[in-house]
Amino acid sequence: MCRLLYTLASSAFVFQAHAFTVADWLNHEVPEAEPSMQYEGNPVTLKFSSPNPAASLVPEVWSRGFRWLEEATSGKLNIEEYHGGTLHAAADGWRAVRSRVTDYAACYTSYEGSGFPLHKAIELPFVTPSSPVAATRIMQELAPEYFVPEWEGRGVLYGYTVIAGVSDIMSNRPIRTPEDLRGMRVIAQGFPPEAAEALGITTLNTPFPEIYTAFQQGIADAVIWVDPGFVPFKIYELASYHTSLGMTAQHIDTCINREAYEDLPAELKPVFAEFQQNIAHAVSQRLGVEFREEALRTYQENGVELIELTDEEKQAWRAVLEPVLEQWIEAREAEGLPARKLIEDIRRLEAQYEGKSAEELFEITVTEPVPELLPQAE
């Protein structure tokens, strides 16, 4: 049974008397999200692939969203799913989409050493907003200017970026200060080497199916990750401490084969394009918002000590890591990239969406979709 636990919002929203929920959308109770296309042609099927195993939370959200898409188009647009790395490994999504092994896939920039200099800003310390759903909306708004060109440089189309959370630390000794972490070998995907150097740690970019074993065998001393990783992959069985830090974004990126998209009938292109934004929010809400409470209960039930940092302790982390951001900005600006403007835009939109509930942000996503994320029919 699907474990999606979407709840009703209690606060009013400016556009309507109440904010509708992801559950409403999935149940076809949001008229604004229902496609108005009139397509009488043959059904179309696209292949979607991901390396995410059954233990991961996200395949169930994807599956429910793809079911919505099939139902909303009366069976005219269908997604055939391949999870668990059956079509490609975690680092090979881009190549698989380009060569059309798959039409549409999870394509993680965190595994790429180059080619995404601006998108990787979200992996810098304390850049990404603490609200995953707000951060996901911000990524959508900024994508046409900053990220779509990077995807197209890889020969694919931009799907979306989901912020699954901002990373915390699990370890076998308490970590409150940067000095407590210094000298450790730390599993951390997409963690900038400049930040690792500032903290005095060695990072291991271990594929997530292998993280449990690496930590268990002592190859790593700590894991920087998010709850949707810590819990499904049972890191809490090995770690004694969980330090809430909210340091760098953990994200899920998708890309689309250009030919597969261009081959879609004109009536189905806008349906598929707007679906990207709605499913991105649904994944972010499930992983980054709802699952947080479940995770905290799991830690407590398994004897993991939850460490909440004081304001003074948080400032100590920022003092060590903030120079990393400025150095990154200067380096990217020297390459002719608008890095400072990107960070300013993230901060501006963070202030705009601060305090909005997940349901309010979902209604914005549905009623004000970001144009130009995918080319429309001519």
Image: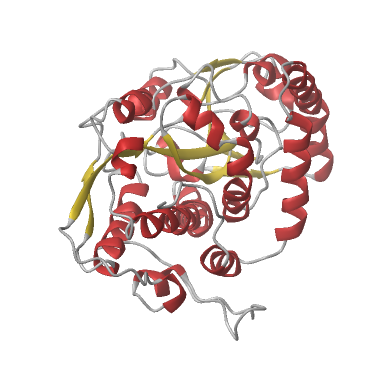
Left-right relation of 169 to 335: left
User: What residue is rendered at 65% in x and 41% in y?
Assistant: 246
Q: How is the image coloured?
A: secondary structure
What is the total number of numbered labels drawn onto the structure image? 0
Q: Is residue 166 left or right of residue 231?
A: right
Q: Position of residue 332 (x, y in %)?
A: 72, 21
Q: Pick out the residue farthest to the bottom.
A: 17
> Above or below — where is 3 with respect to 32?
above
Q: For the view shown, which residue lies furthest in the left direction?
A: 42
- Residue 378, position in %: x, y? 42, 51
Q: Is residue 65 visible?
A: yes
Q: Residue at x 22, y 30 (%)?
A: 87
47 or 287, which is in the foreground? 47
Give how far across and how far down residue 345 sits, in percent. 74, 44
**Horizontal placement of 269 versus 190: left or right?**
left
Identity of the residue furthest to the front in this view: 378
**Residue 2 appearing in the image:** no
Looking at the picture, tell me which residue is in the foreground, 172 or 243.
243
Q: Relative to 270, does residue 99 appear above or below in the rendering?
A: above
Of residues 257 and 210, the one nearer the viewer is 257
Check the image and report above or below for 313 versus 301.
above
- Residue at image location 63% in from the left, 79% down from the top: 15
Q: Is residue 293 above or below residue 182?
A: below
Q: Along the line of sight, which residue is nearer the eye, 193 or 320?
A: 193
- The residue under the point 46% across, 23% down is 111
Residue 229: name its quadrant.
Answer: top left
